[in-house]
């Protein structure tokens, strides 16, 4: 099916879906990160998993990869200008998660 004919939510899930992609994007909201730092911040995925998801986000124009000509080489990942448009989505997900965590905590306290 052509992208034009697909549901917008389906397209969003295709781009943002994956175990680590939302956390990668969220952690990049604060600015560029190196691979190792990003790996620790998102929950310590395998190197392969993180690499694959970063490449997918780069291919979709969400993340930019910058290689610095240094010894040893340094690579940083940052949100592209288009990727930054996901900021309200990611903040809404964060806020919803906080609310849900509070609900679960209060349900556990009341025995429900």
Image (cartoon, rainbow, N blue to C red):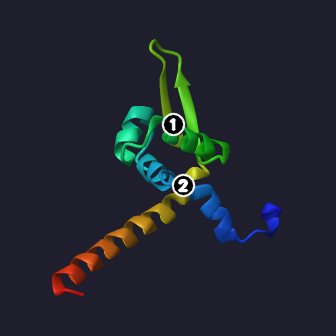
Q: Earlier in the sequence, mark 2 or mark 1?
A: 2
**Image mark for residue 48:** 1
Indicate whether 14 appears above or below 112: above
Residue 77 rendering spot, x and y as whole percentages:
50, 37
Residue 31 rendering spot, x and y as whole percentages:
43, 43
**Image mark for residue 111:** none
Residue 69 rendering spot, x and y as whole percentages:
53, 16
Q: Quadrant of the C terminus?
A: bottom left
Q: Image point 60% across, 48% down: which residue?
A: 62
Q: Quadrant of the N terminus?
A: bottom right
Residue 12 rendering spot, x and y as whole percentages:
63, 63
Badge 1: few (under 14), some or many (20 or more) residues near its Cα, within 10 Å?
A: few
Badge 2: few (under 14), some or many (20 or more) residues near its Cα, within 10 Å?
A: few
Total numbered badges shown on the rendered structure: 2
Label 2 close to label 1 by CB (< 8 Å): no
Q: Image point 62% across, 45% down: which residue?
A: 56
In what element is the residue under mark 1?
helix
Q: Image point 41% across, 40% down: which residue?
A: 38
99 or 111: which is nearer to us? Answer: 111
Indicate whether 60 appears above or below 107: above
Q: Which residue is mark 2?
A: 18
Q: Image point 49% across, 59% down: which residue?
A: 87
Indicate whether 48 appears above or below 25: above
Residue sticking out furthest to the top? 71
């Amino acid at each position: 099916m052509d992208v034009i004919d697909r549901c917008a939510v389906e397209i969003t899930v295709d781009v943002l879906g994956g175990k680590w992609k939302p956390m990668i994007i969220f952690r990049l909201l604060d600015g560029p990160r190196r691979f190792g730092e990003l790996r620790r911040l998102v929950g310590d995925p395998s190197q392969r998993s993180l690499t694959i998801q970063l490449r997918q986000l780069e291919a979709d124009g969400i993340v930019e990869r910058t290689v610095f000509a240094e010894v040893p080489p340094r690579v940083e990942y940052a949100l592209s200008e288009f990727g930054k448009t996901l900021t309200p989505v990611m903040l809404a997900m964060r806020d919803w998660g906080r609310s849900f965590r509070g609900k679960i905590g209060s349900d556990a306290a009341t025995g429900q």
